[in-house]
Image: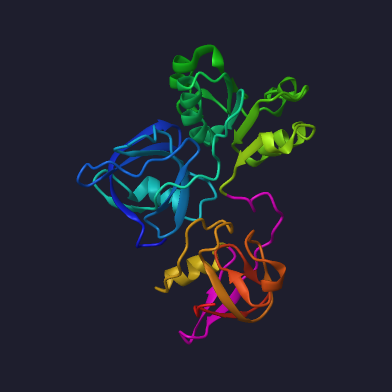
Amino acid sequence: MNELNDLKLLVSQKTEVAAGILEFQFVAGDGSVLPSFQPGSHVAIATPCGANRQYSLINDGKEPTFYQIAVKLEPQSRGGSQSMHEQLNVGHSVLVQPPDNSFPLLDAPGYLLIGGGIGITPLIGMAKTCRSNGKPFRLIYCARSEGQAAYWEDLKNTFDESVVIHFDDGDPEKVYDFWDEFMIPNANHVYCCGPRPLMDEIKALSGHWPEQQIHFEDFNPQSGLEYVNLPFTVSIKSAGESFEVHETATILETLRSHGLRVPSSCESGTCGSCKMKLLSGSVEHRDFVLESEEYESAIMVCVSRGRGNIEIDFEDF
């Protein structure tokens, strides 16, 4: 994270809002107003394990005195969500980047908001904004069960008939049928956030809609790709050291664990913060930043991996 711009905030609340989902609220130590944000915004947080993770903001972004997020404990977590659940408590300080928005609520005649599981979080602020602005909207919230659905009762009580809550009990035969929502294109904009299967379904069903009307929030854009992780060795020329990168770790996490700091933000291959110089070796580039002509000279160490041993460095480009 960029330490010059980071906000040092305190955990003011930590509350369980569903099975495996904790809500955190962060405030400034002096109680001052925090940087404002628009619906769909997120913050990047330096989790206790050292990894940066992005979380959607839930609360009103006009002159906020706190930031509210919800964190799901991911079964396959590399440590980020687990450390938030187990190590971050009320009174602890945390570094938070100012809000950013890659999922903005654009002006439209109306909206269809689709959330799955923890993906409901950015849509809550959108629904509140739609109501405040008198814009028609429909919110469809899909989850496995009541106990695993954060905020569903509040949403139903607040928005009533504008909200559809659907529980499928994990049964593929009970999944929500979205076809009626997409059969006939209209002028509404669609916002979707949730598990990969849900977003893939919405992409398929909306294929005959204008592309600019369909919006997705995805903090892990490579999660749907079939990559196989193999161990390799990464050497840092200026440090004169080499490290084994295991199957379950990234280069960035490996360097961080050995006390070598690399600027980073998204840690999903989309922001470009962790770009390093590639000196030798072949790389499997998994990012969404580098141009093809940079493949032989650069690497995004948050997601990309060596096809065998590689040598890199911190030198400026």
The quarter of the image holding the N terminus is: bottom left
Q: Quadrant of residue 250?
A: bottom right
Farthest residue to the left: give it: 30
The quarter of the image holding the C terminus is: bottom right
**Image position, residue 270 (x, y; %):** 58, 56
Residue appearing at x 72%, y 55% in the figure? 226
Left or right relative to 309: residue 264? left
**Image position, residue 150 (x, y; %):** 46, 29
Asked whether 2 falls inside the magenta stretch, the response is no
Looking at the image, is 17 positioned above or below residue 285?
above
Residue appearing at x 64%, y 77% in the figure? 297
Asked whether 229 falls inside the magenta stretch, the response is yes
For the magenta stretch, what is the residue range?
220-247
Looking at the image, is 207 positioned above or below residue 137?
below
**Does residue 136 appear anywhere in the picture?**
yes
**Image position, residue 67 (x, y; %):** 35, 40
Farthest residue to the right: give it: 208
In depth, the one of 99 and 95 nearer the eye is 99
- How many numbered marks, from 0 up? 0
Q: Quadrant of residue 175?
A: top right
**Does residue 198 appear anywhere in the picture?**
no
**Image position, residue 260 (x, y; %):** 42, 74
What main secondary structure does the magenta stretch of the protein show?
A: loop
Residue appearing at x 68%, y 23% in the figure? 174
Colour logic: rainbow
